[in-house]
Amino acid sequence: MQIAHELPDFDFVLRGADGRSALVNDLRLVASFIITPRQLITDWEATDVASLEPEMLEPLLVLDPEVVVLGTGEIQGFPPPRTLAACLRRGVGLEAMTNAAAARTYSVLASEGRRVVAAFIINA
């Protein structure tokens, strides 16, 4: 059996993430970041999902996603209701999960050509 591995035509490929770091291309990230297939923002100010304010989502929402995948660290957590409401008002879905699950989900959605933005909270 022949198994072909197709690499997507992405500038940035998320190879994995956990609560303390992530690997994008060959770059190890140890601080919170935002990723799309074409863009990597390494200076996202988020440090804790419970204190995620609506204005902290602006760098994600200006990228015009249909869905935001939020990696909340090693343990799944949820942002405050007002932060979730900021996405819903714009018609954007927000899914919160552990960083490992968010990395897998983001990769699948991106490979399907969906307008997905992922944000990861890293607690180094």
Image (cartoon, rainbow, N blue to C red):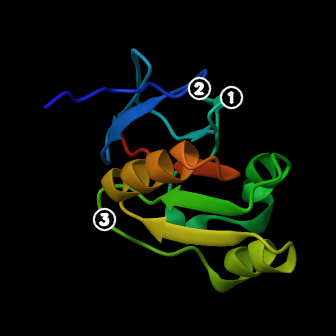
Q: Position of residue 56 (x, y in %)?
A: 73, 55
Q: Residue at x 42, y 44 (%)?
A: 122
Q: CA distance from mark 1 to mark 3?
A: 27 Å
Residue contact between numbered discs 1 and 2, judged by CB atoms under 8 Å: yes
Whichever of labels 1 and 2 marks the residue nearer the N terminus, that label is 2
Check disc 3 and give the amino acid type: Ile
Secondary element at tag 3: loop
User: Mark 2 or mark 3: which is in front?
Assistant: 2
Label at residue 38: 1
User: How far across and down, in percent of the image, does residue 106 sit?
Assistant: 49, 50
Task: Please report whichever mark, 2 or 3, sits nearer to the chain's N-terminal start.
Answer: 2
Mark 1 to mark 2 CA distance (whole Å)? 6 Å
State the residue at coordinates (80%, 55%): 61
Image side of residue 46 versus residue 124, left or right = right
In space, the residues marked 2 and 3 are separated at their CA atoms by 28 Å
Which element type, helix, strand or loop, lies under badge 2?
A: loop
Q: Which mark is residue 75?
A: 3
